[in-house]
């Protein structure tokens, strides 16, 4: 008579007589997702608003007169006749061409005197006060 092979103790701890070959590792339960707090949402909205204003201001200021260089053409802004902005010289809106740009503070009298020294100049535009102060001597387009 033959004796069956020894099978060990099926009731011993750590052994599972029904296991399928590979040891099972416990999977931790998935953590529930936290909803963003009101404070987080508010901060994100504020950052987006600030960036939008900053980018809009930058884009709007790219064609201001303080960005003008010699050879650029200008037109008066529609919002006020004492402000000018850069336009294409081929544009029908072009009113004057920059023939000289000088940094510094100029009153109406000193600006006119300075631009009279420039042969091609027929007018001037001076910007003073907050920000950059400069004088543009203007000629015909």
Image (cartoon, grey):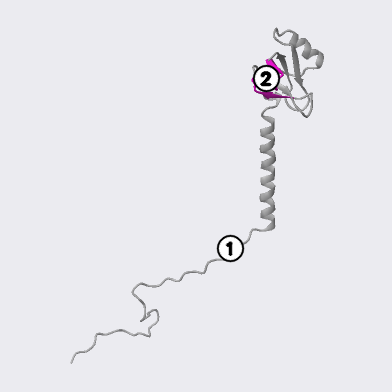
Q: Tell me which label, 1 or 2, sits earlier in the chain.
A: 1
Residue found at x 66% / y 22%: 91
Looking at the image, residue 116 lies above or below residue 17? above
Which residue in the protein does label 2 denote? 73
Q: Residues within 10 Å of mark 2 (few under 14, many from 20)?
A: many
Vertical placement of residue 70 versus 51, above or below: above
Image coords of residue 18 (percent x, y): 36, 80
Residue 86 versus residue 50: which sits nearer the camera?
Answer: 86
Q: In which quarter of the image is residue 102?
A: top right
From the image, which quarter does the C terminus lie in? top right
Q: Is mark 2 on a helix, strand or loop?
A: strand
Whether the magenta-drawn stretch holds residue 96 is answered as: yes
Question: Measured from the top left, where is residue 63 in percent x and y?
Answer: 68, 27
Classify residue 6 as left or right of residue 69.
Answer: left
Please tell me how many numbered marks the rendered image carries.
2
The answer to whether residue 8 is left or right of residue 91 is: left
The mark closer to the camera, 1 or 2, is 2
Residue at 24% over, 87% down: 4
Q: Does the magenta stretch include residue 36?
A: no
Residue that appears at 68% across and 16% down: 98
* Badge 1 element: loop
Q: Is residue 90 above or below residue 46?
A: above
Q: Where does label 1 land, which residue?
A: 33
Q: Residue 125 placed where, x, y %?
A: 75, 18
Residue 36 versus residue 8 in the image, above or below: above
Residue ranking furthest to the bottom = 1
**Residue extent of the magenta highlight:** 84-101
């Amino acid at each position: 008579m033959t004796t069956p092979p020894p099978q060990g103790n099926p009731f011993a701890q750590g052994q599972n007589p029904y296991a399928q070959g590979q040891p099972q590792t416990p999977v931790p339960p998935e953590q529930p997702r936290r909803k963003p707090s009101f404070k987080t949402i508010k901060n994100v909205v504020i950052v987006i608003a600030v960036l939008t204003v900053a980018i809009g201001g930058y884009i709007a200021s790219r064609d201001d007169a303080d960005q003008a260089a010699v050879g650029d053409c200008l037109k008066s802004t529609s919002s006020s006749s004492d402000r000018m902005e850069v336009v294409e010289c081929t544009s029908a809106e072009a009113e004057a061409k920059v023939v000289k740009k000088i940094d510094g503070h100029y009153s109406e009298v000193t600006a006119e005197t300075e631009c009279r020294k420039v042969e091609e100049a027929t007018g001037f535009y001076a910007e003073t006060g907050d920000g950059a102060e400069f004088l543009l001597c203007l000629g015909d387009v």
